[in-house]
Amino acid sequence: MAAMAIASSLRGAARRSALIRLALDSVGRQNMIQMVQLRWIAVIGQILTIVYVVQMYEVRLPLVQMANVISILICLNLFSLFFPQRNATVYRWQIFFGLCGDVAVLTALLYCSGGATNPFVFLYLLQVTLAAMLLDGWLTWMIVGLTTVCFTALTKYYQPLQLPEHSRYTLFELHILGMLVCFALNAGLLVIFVNRITSILRGREERLAELRQREVEEDLIVRMGLLASGAAHELGTPLATLSVILGDWRRMPEFRDRPELLEEIGDMEEQVRRCKTIVTGILLSAGEARGESLGITTPQRFMDELVAEWRAKRHVPTLDYDFDQDAELPADLSIVSDSALKQVICNVLDNALEASPQWLAFEVRCTAQTLSMQVRDFGRGFAPEILAQLGKPYQSTKGKPGGGLGLFLVVNVIRKLGGSVTAENLIGGGALVSMSLPLASLAIGGSHES
């Protein structure tokens, strides 16, 4: 059992590692998409700015050289747009080289339009801000160093802006106007894209926190399974001993001649058999079949037998049980008789019976894709804090030490089968627990785990 638990933990760790890697890859792709959108804004802004400056202020610019630079930026953007679709993972170095390309294009445009005297030189701060948010420390400092070198080079190497002799504006006036436009552009883009990137990173942290919580819950399940299996094994020997002793008592003259004692011995044997059944169920749920083969059944037979066994062991005045299967499904549709699923359904029914001893309803619907189950009762319903923390361990209003594990196990077993569990309070009173899982998870050869 310990080896099985370790193997289960390793499989769970592998699944969690894959999910964490998927979450990080998704964030990388989203960040790359944000950079692509920013570049399209840059392309449009650069074209409009060049056209506006040339037409309104008659500034002489090397339009052919600047058009070539903008074409390079468009090609870089198209490459960045389609590259993540061909490669699932977007690494930080890819974002780093993308930012380096943006810095190079901006530097080339500034070289053609006044160098460091161009007020749009402060757009370097936008690249530095994005690097600080998207890259590691040393990569960010490399972007800082690159922009500093480019800024310094533009103070010496550039093509000066040229105004016509009859221009009504001076270079200083255009510089002040350009600074105003650059400030508004920098501020607007930073607000928009920093908020977007922050939202992406916050979503990543939430997904990672959820995965870590699942890791804690699965670890708790493994430890509970080890405890339950160990207890079941330990109980097997004394129960067998009790069964032998009671059999000997039944044959002894002191008991054989007294019917009232024989009746009590029969009751004791029945309780021992019930304990053995419970122990067997625990071992089955833990993955140890005690030599018994895996059962194959149909959805309706599985549910009918489950309800019949549950009714036989508990006093239920009224249980409204209904099974509905789509007409197009074959009546002999085969599924695996999953003992863990049976146990969690009985757990939900037990909770409903405890809340509503006089009446409860159990409705099952089987479609081609889904097996849906609903348990309703007329009890007091769930407390708000229980609904808010559905499926979390030790969330109980019964006041019992270690309570609140029933729904925790229900949620986790159904989730392991690829399904979901919801709970709600009904308007007319009582509560409704809905369980839904893909029928493929119970199909023969399906990818379910007991």
Image (cartoon, rainbow, N blue to C red):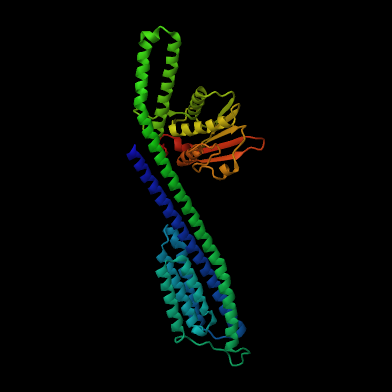
**Residue positioned most to the top:** 257
Q: Quadrant of residue 337?
A: top left
Is residue 266 visible in the rendered structure shown here? yes
The residue shown at (53%, 60%) is 199
Q: Quadrant of the N terminus?
A: top left
Is residue 289 visible in the rendered structure shown here? no
**Residue positioned most to the bottom:** 165
Q: For the image shown, how many numbered marks are present on the structure?
A: 0
Q: Where residue 174 sits: x, y (%)?
A: 59, 85
Q: Quadrant of residue 245?
A: top left
| Above or below 153: residue 211 | above
Along the horizontal axis of the image, is 15 left or right of 303? left
Q: Quadrant of residue 137?
A: bottom left
| Above or below 65: residue 10 | above
Q: Where residue 400 sits: x, y (%)?
A: 51, 36
The residue shown at (55%, 86%) is 60
The residue shown at (58%, 71%) is 188
Q: Where residue 374 sits: x, y (%)?
A: 56, 34
Q: Where residue 68 sits: x, y (%)?
A: 47, 77
| Residue 179 vs residue 358, the one in the foreground | 358
| Residue 82 vs residue 252, the one in the foreground | 252
